Image: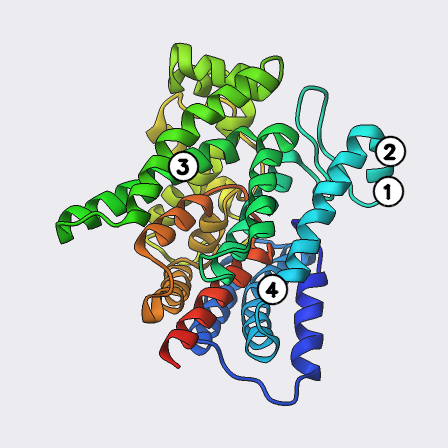
Amino acid sequence: MDSQPWPLLTGLVFLGSTRFVRAPPYIGPLSISITAGLIISIALSVNPTLTEILRAIAGYSTLIVVYFAFYNYLLRFGFPSSLLFFSAVSWLVFAFVEMVSPSIISMFAAQRTSVGRGLTSLAPEPTFFAIFLLFLSWIIFVGRNYQPSRREVFLIAANLLAIFLLARSTMVIVYIAVAAVIYSGFFVIKSIGSLRMRGSHIFAVMFALISMPFAKLLIEAFLEDTRTGRLMSTLSQKGLLAIISSDASIINRIEGSVLSIHAALYNKLIPGGLDTYLTTKELVRPFWGKIFWYPTVSNKILSWNGVLLYELGVFGLMAFVWLVLAAVRKGSASGAEIVIFAMFAMGAIPMAFPLIPMLFAVWAYNGKRMSA
């Protein structure tokens, strides 16, 4: 998931085989911002390896090419609901196969998991499996104009259950809970501002209020003796600080999100280079005291937003703005969705993850349909 070139190659083949292509919203300034930022970042690197340079080029190219290609695919063929449905079901099937025979899955993907953690399916880690299901469900929901069919509703529900019961990713479970609160909060504020409460607003608030205790019951019933269950038990009994002070995996992911942004601001949003993050990170670490007590000795940034802002600096910020403008054009994506995406993107998602540009392509496509 973090370095496979297939989405980039598939996008290039599709664009090359398509006679007429249309530029998606803001593709020009997006490409210029990323290209300029990457050139400067490579120039400001100390001693980057060829692998680091090629990985960066491939990652940022995937963001541009997949956004461009999937937007044109949508214009030409419409939303591929059946294809995405099949993809989601395939990942779920492989997860169940893994339960029976993990050795079979190792033939398809390198696994990095351990006893007590969740399943990986076709991803290298349980968290990546959960992230894939989460974003794929989001794309299906948006692509169906927020009115999924009955079978897609069941699929999205199955994906959410798989995140809890199969992937068992604590970070993604927390993201979902926070997203429900954010989504409900936006609707409540909007309703108060307009002095009326729509049925969809009431549903969103009720969903948030019901889903969190339901999730707690699921964890207590099925995950009590797992890492996720123990962490949630610690959270409810001792609070968030107890988890931060005891779980190395979670503190590493939070460190990647927080210190990468802090390091980017420390550089005054000047592109930071491809091999300087470790040095800059250690310069800003003392500001946080003993919070990040289990440091990672690596230049790899475990955050999609962190990579964009640290490596590309102000150009990365501009690229993010162009993507957001494409998404909210003609009222396609809501403010709540953008805030939720920004939160998700703080997580350990690689720049080459194709579902992010696919999501923005769907938002841009929906905006075009609204203006037609």
Three-letter amino acid code of the residue under disc 4: Thr
Which residue: 51% across, 40% down? Answer: 278
Res 290 quadrant in image = top left
Q: Position of residue 195 (x, y in %)?
A: 12, 50
* Rendered position, 42 above or below 125: below
What is the crowding at mark 4: few (fewer than 14 residues within 10 Å), some, or many (at least 20)? many
Gap in Å between the C-alphas at discs 2 and 1?
7 Å
Which residue: 71% across, 45% down? Answer: 91
Q: Is residue 299 left or right of residue 280?
A: right
Q: Are marks 2 and 1 in contact (CB under 8 Å)?
A: yes
Q: Are marks 2 and 3 in contact (CB under 8 Å)?
A: no
Q: Out of 271 and 234, give the one closest to the viewer.
A: 234
Three-letter amino acid code of the residue under disc 1: Met
- Pointer 2 residue: 103
Q: Nearer the viewer, mark 2 or mark 3?
A: 2
Gap in Å between the C-alphas at discs 1 and 4?
25 Å
Residue 62 circle label: 4
Q: Out of 1 and 56, give the one closest to the viewer.
A: 1
Three-letter amino acid code of the residue under disc 2: Ser
Q: Can residue 54 be seen in the rendering of this structure?
A: no
What is the crowding at mark 3: few (fewer than 14 residues within 10 Å), some, or many (at least 20)? few
Q: Earlier in the sequence, mark 2 or mark 3?
A: 2
Three-letter amino acid code of the residue under disc 3: Leu
Gap in Å between the C-alphas at discs 2 and 4?
31 Å
Q: Nearer the viewer, mark 1 or mark 4?
A: 1
Q: How many marks?
A: 4
Res 140 quadrant in image = bottom right
Gap in Å between the C-alphas at discs 1 and 3?
42 Å
Residue 282 circle label: none
